[in-house]
Image (cartoon, helix red, strand yellow):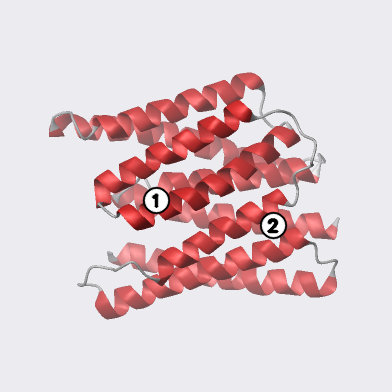
């Protein structure tokens, strides 16, 4: 980890501490819905993961990181966020079989890429399983909130296919083409990331339903996670910032929901 990445990690920890303190204060002075409690659990998991990573970098930066606490912390984040979304989903909702199947395939394809890049079978598979829980609940809630039209769902699916194809092709094409494929994937990832972030901010400004704000803020975070796991070098550092920005916007969405 270079100096910039280390500074970004410290910045993330500071922001998470602020979010945690603010979230607890909100819970003490307002009604405490289960969804907010799960968000606090996610914040604690994220904070523990980053704190462990920081300690590792300061103490054992030259040693290969083992299967350790930071992975468990990340799983706790995804499970807590998935549970927070699950509590919001109505028992009777529109059929989303295609979307759920597509989401699961997309995550499974990403797991195959991670294994190909890192060779870490166990932790990558477990991460994929908890992400499927998180993402399928998110898709169900997004369908319930009706934040995307049918055409946009199809467009998002096509983008996901292209991203997977571009990354997978990197294992088979000559090395001089890998950079081009990575660029294509990064552009598409940035486009979707920008869309979700912009719609999240617009949802704060507008007077629409809180459900829409929650949907877009969770979508921003979920996309930032998958983006981070498929990026490297300078792009990785940028996405680290986008991830903590998305998490902060998610906190603000939860706070707004509680205060309404």
- Which mark is first along the chain, 2 or 1? 1
* Picture residue at 28% right of the left edge, 68% below the top: 65
Residue where numbered disc 1 is placed? 125
The span from disc 1 to disc 2 (Cα, nearest Å) is 31 Å
Q: Residue 49 location in percent, x, y?
A: 46, 68
Secondary structure, mark 2, is helix
Secondary structure, mark 1, is helix
221 or 63: nearer the viewer: 63
Q: Residue 198 location in percent, x, y?
A: 61, 39
Position of the N terminus, as image quadrant, is bottom left
The answer to whether any part of residue 150 appears in the image is: yes
Q: Residue 29 location in percent, x, y?
A: 84, 73
Position of the C terminus, as image quadrant, is bottom right
Residue where numbered disc 2 is placed? 252
Q: Is residue 236 left or right of residue 194?
A: left
Q: Quadrant of residue 180?
A: top left
* Picture residue at 80% right of the left edge, 62% below the top: 33
Q: Is residue 171 left or right of residue 231?
A: left
The answer to whether any part of residue 10 appears in the image is: no
Q: Residues within 10 Å of mark 2 (few under 14, many from 20)?
A: some
* Above-or-below relation of 66 to 133: below
Q: Residue 130 location in percent, x, y?
A: 51, 52
Q: Quadrant of residue 3?
A: bottom left
Q: Is residue 5 left or right of residue 84?
A: left
Nearer the observer: mark 1 or 2; the answer is 1
53 or 117: nearer the viewer: 117
The residue positioned farthest toward the top in the image shown: 151
- Residue 3's disc is none
* Picture residue at 18% right of the left edge, 30% below the top: 172
* Above-or-below relation of 17 to 125: below
* Picture residue at 42% right of the left edge, 71% below the top: 69
58 or 202: nearer the viewer: 58
């Amino acid at each position: 980890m270079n100096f910039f990445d280390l500074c970004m990690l410290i910045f993330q920890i500071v922001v998470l501490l602020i979010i945690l303190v603010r979230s607890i204060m909100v819970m003490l002075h307002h009604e405490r819905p289960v969804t907010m409690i799960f968000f606090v659990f996610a914040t604690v998991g994220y904070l523990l993961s980053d704190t462990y990573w920081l300690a590792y970098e300061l103490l054992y930066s030259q040693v290969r990181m083992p299967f350790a606490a930071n992975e468990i912390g990340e799983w706790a984040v995804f499970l807590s966020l998935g549970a927070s979304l699950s509590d919001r989903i109505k028992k009777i909702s529109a059929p989303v079989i295609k979307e759920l199947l597509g989401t699961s395939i997309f995550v499974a394809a990403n797991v195959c890429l991670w294994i190909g890049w890192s060779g870490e079978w166990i932790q990558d598979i477990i991460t994929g399983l908890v992400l499927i829980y998180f993402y399928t609940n998110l898709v169900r809630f997004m369908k319930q909130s009706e934040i995307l039209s049918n055409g946009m769902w199809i467009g998002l699916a096509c983008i996901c296919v292209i991203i997977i194809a571009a990354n997978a092709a990197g294992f088979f094409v000559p090395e001089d083409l890998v950079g081009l494929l990575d660029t294509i994937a990064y552009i598409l990832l940035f486009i979707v990331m920008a869309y979700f972030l912009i719609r999240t901010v617009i949802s704060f400004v507008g007077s629409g339903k809180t459900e829409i704000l929650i949907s877009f803020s969770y979508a921003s975070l979920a996309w930032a996670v998958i983006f981070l796991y498929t990026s490297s070098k300078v792009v990785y550092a940028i996405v680290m910032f986008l991830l903590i920005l998305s998490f902060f916007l998610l906190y603000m969405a939860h706070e707004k929901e509680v205060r309404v």
